[in-house]
Image (cartoon, rainbow, N blue to C red):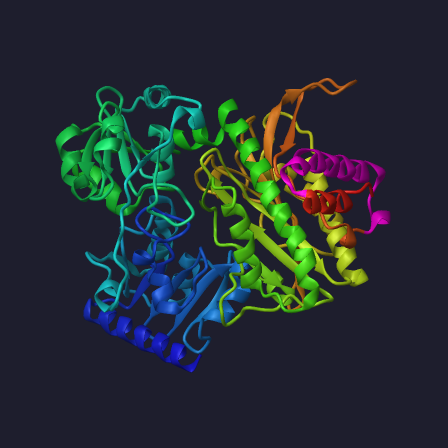
Amino acid sequence: MQERAQVAASRLAALRTSIRSLGLSGFVVPKGDAFQNETVPPHWDRLAWLTGFTGSAGCALILEDKAALIVDSRYTLQAKAQVDASLYAVELFPKTKVSSYLSANTPKGAAIGYDPTLHTLAAFKAMEDEAKKAGFELRPVTSNPIDALWEGRPAAHYIPIVIHGEEYAGESAPSKIARVRKAIEDKKAAGLLVSAPDAVAWLFNLRGRDVAHTPVPLVRAFVPLTGKPVIFTSPGHITPENQAFIAPLADIHDLASLADALLGFIEKGTKVIVDPAQTTLHVADALRKSGAMLIEVADPCTLFKARKNPVELQGSRNAHVRDGAAFCRFLAWLDAKAPSGTLTEIAASDCLEAFRRDTSLLEDLSFDTISGAGSNGAIVHYRAMPETNKVLEPGTLYLIDSGGQYRDGTTDVTRTVAIGTPSEEMRRHYTLVLKGHIAIATARFPSGTRGVDIDGFARRALWDAGLDYGHGTGHGVGSFLSVHEGPQSISRNGMTELEPGMILSNEPGYYREGHYGIRLENLLAVTEPKPIEGGETAMLGFETLTLAPFDHRLIVPDLLTSTERDWLNDYHARVRGELSPLLNGDGAKWLRAVTAVL
């Protein structure tokens, strides 16, 4: 621990020296790369190198006499555990924003540096507006000063692009391109710059292995209103096999030459659509230098991608049956092993991955498994490490949040399990969370409903008890793409209307710091509007995709209404019916017992 603190202090001091040599009074270090990946490849994880913080969201602000790490509520405990408090003040977003912190701590006339390859148009605007009001300067750097200090930096790797066949995609790339061109025409634009790798992957039916857990290649694309699209790739992406598929769809250019290439095929005054949430300042500047006029609106691929077609929905159902059987094998194994008091978090998560790999169809995990025993379960995005690896002890709760990437679908499931005999307090809190989960699963709502409109459904039982949780209730999920996909969500920020075919998570929780965490997550698909007997308006709803039992030992039946109990019994009957044929004799017997009528 002391050695780690010394390394962090040395790196911070070296960065401050470098910043001063550039005539800067500070520097912004976001958790991100040039593609805005949630899982940042090691080569670009500058925030982890500098601070030791490994969470998926955060930003360090380095000033001459102070430094701060801003994280959201998911990472409060993790940041405090990983970051030296004598070096960095841990601030909580949204109470503290990057822009407000800089405004409050930067002297007038000072210059704060930033890397334009890492900041999007949308995110930068708040900093820019605050800088103008507070009287300090935001100054771009031509090369990130951390890169010159980073000894032993991992190399960047680009893996050959993989073709995602129509048997999985459900629609041809030419059909998707035609839909996108219609959206370009509707905006009276001449083209679209596609910055997000998952949008490029969806549009051209491609997948990749450049990023852990998210099957995308790190590429960009330009789609003109007329003429052939262009895909910008890196060495290692193209092979004779995938080139034969890509070449009829798009010209292939080197990503490193993007700025020069844009000059070659964008006429001065051309209107080009860019998504401000995905397009970096560096890319936007290259477009402007080419003579383009930018139309800053959401990439149409984002919404098209969110609405899964029938083939993708069926693929997701198939993946969830397969994944559910593997998860049940794990839960049965856990029930047998955990009472010994010798099983660790890492051993448990490794076993779950092994059961998934036994399917022979797992491509990757969909994210780093959250395997939290006891108090570690209260860390929302906890990741077990050798120095934090707890034993699953009798009388505690164990939270497991995990998922798989299969060619036909992406899964994400969370269950909280009793190890030994739970306390009545644990059972009460678990049941309140379960009531919120059921409230979302059974919700009916009219067209035009947004995620923000139903987020409170999941919180009602907890609110009535004076409890809450600090994260959103649900995120969008891709089809063999990102496990965290926009624009759809069920949250206080969920402003996108929910539409048939969208897949979202349903994961209310409760976290008692220092004791335990509870989260119950299934994936849902939004269903087509259907009439309700005696009603006047057809209503959308949800189809539950995930198949895994809830822990009966943690349920207080008297806290459930008859409707909630019926839903739970029906769900467990479905889990039993679909998964029993895929389990062996002992596994099927275990499943019958844990899905018995409540």
Residue 563 in which image quadrant: top right
Residue 418 appears anywhere in the view: yes
Residue 88 shown in magenta: no
Magenta region, main secondary structure: helix
How many labels were placed on the picture?
Answer: 0
User: Is residue 566 in the magenta section?
Assistant: yes
Q: Is residue 465 visible?
A: no
The vertical placement of 129 against 197, above or below, is: below
Quadrant in which the C terminus appears = top right
340 or 548, which lies in front? 340
Residue at image position (23%, 23%) is 248
Position of 222 compared to 545: left or right? Answer: left
Q: Where is residue 321 in the image (x, y as percent from the top left)?
A: 59, 36
Question: Vertical placement of 314 versus 429: above or below?
Answer: above
Q: Position of residue 324 (x, y in %)?
A: 61, 41
Taking the spot 39% from the left edge, 34% from the top edge, the residue there is: 298
Task: Name the one closer to the observer, 560 or 568.
Answer: 568
- The answer to which image quadrant residue 455 occupies is top right
In the displayed structure image, the side of residue 596 where residue 173 appears, left or right = left
Q: Is residue 310 above or below residue 137?
A: above
Question: Residues in magenta?
Answer: 556-584
Q: Residue furthest bottom?
A: 2
Question: Between residues 363 and 491, which one lies in front from this camera angle?
Answer: 363
Q: Where is residue 50 in the image (x, y as percent from the top left)?
A: 34, 68
Task: Determine whether, in the image, residue 482 is placed left or right of residue 475.
Answer: left
Residue 390, x across and y down, in percent: 59, 69
Q: Quadrant of the N terminus?
A: bottom left
User: In percent of the image, x 55 and y 66: which residue is there?
Assistant: 77
Question: Which residue is most to the right?
Answer: 558
